[in-house]
Amino acid sequence: MKAQELAGYFAKKVGKPIAFTIDEIAVGGSFSSELTYAVEPIAVSDENVLHALVTLKSRTVRMGIVKLPKESVVNQEVDIPLKDGDNMTLVLMMAVAEADEGADLLKLPEDNIMRRVYESLQRRLTDRELVRIGIGP
């Protein structure tokens, strides 16, 4: 998909949370779980950057439910530079990776999809900053 098309889609969703669920990897005999987030677009800049608020809404453990406290566990604003070839799922994964796990994802195996998504986002953010200060492509 073209970056401008994605930017247009997210611009129409400003103020409307998008539910997104991912599987959390089980570690050392623990049960795997599903994490459900709300990714709420706040704005889309002229440079095709999505600004969104990410909130963890629930964690469901296979074999039971872990209840979250009344206040959100994750409630963070993120910036996601959109590029040609992106799709909605990739953009939502980038938002969740940046907001919830961050650099901890670098501890996962190199072939882990969330780690690769996070690394790709960090490259984009670095490139954007280099352009902003006048030393990038």
Image: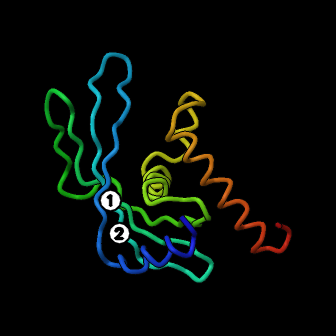
Comparing labels 2 and 1, the label whose residue is closer to the camera: 2
Q: Residue at x 32, y 78 (%)?
A: 15
For the residue carrying disc 2, how many other residues have a C-alpha within 10 Å: few (<14), some (14-19), or many (20+)? many
User: Residue 53, percent across and down?
Assistant: 39, 67
Single out the residue that lies furthest toward the top: 29
| Helix, strand or loop under label 2 | strand
Q: Are marks 2 and 1 in contact (CB under 8 Å)?
A: yes
Please tell me whether residue 26 is drawn above or below residue 11 in the rendered image. Answer: above
| First of labels 2, 1 by sequence position | 2
Please tell me whether residue 18 is drawn above or below residue 46 in the rendered image. Answer: above
Q: Residue at x 35, y 36 (%)?
A: 24
Please tell me whether residue 131 is drawn above or below residue 91 in the rendered image. Answer: below
| Rendering quarter of residue 45 | bottom right
**Of residues 8 and 118, the one drawn nearer to the viewer in this rendering:** 8
Q: Amino acid at mark 2?
A: Glu
Classify residue 77 as left or right of residue 108. Answer: left
Q: Residue at x 44, y 60 (%)?
A: 88
User: Residue 51, percent across and down?
Assistant: 48, 72
Q: Which residue is mark 2?
A: 40
| Helix, strand or loop under label 1 | strand
Mark linked to residue 119: none
Classify residue 129 as left or right of residue 108. Answer: right
Q: Which residue is mark 1?
A: 55
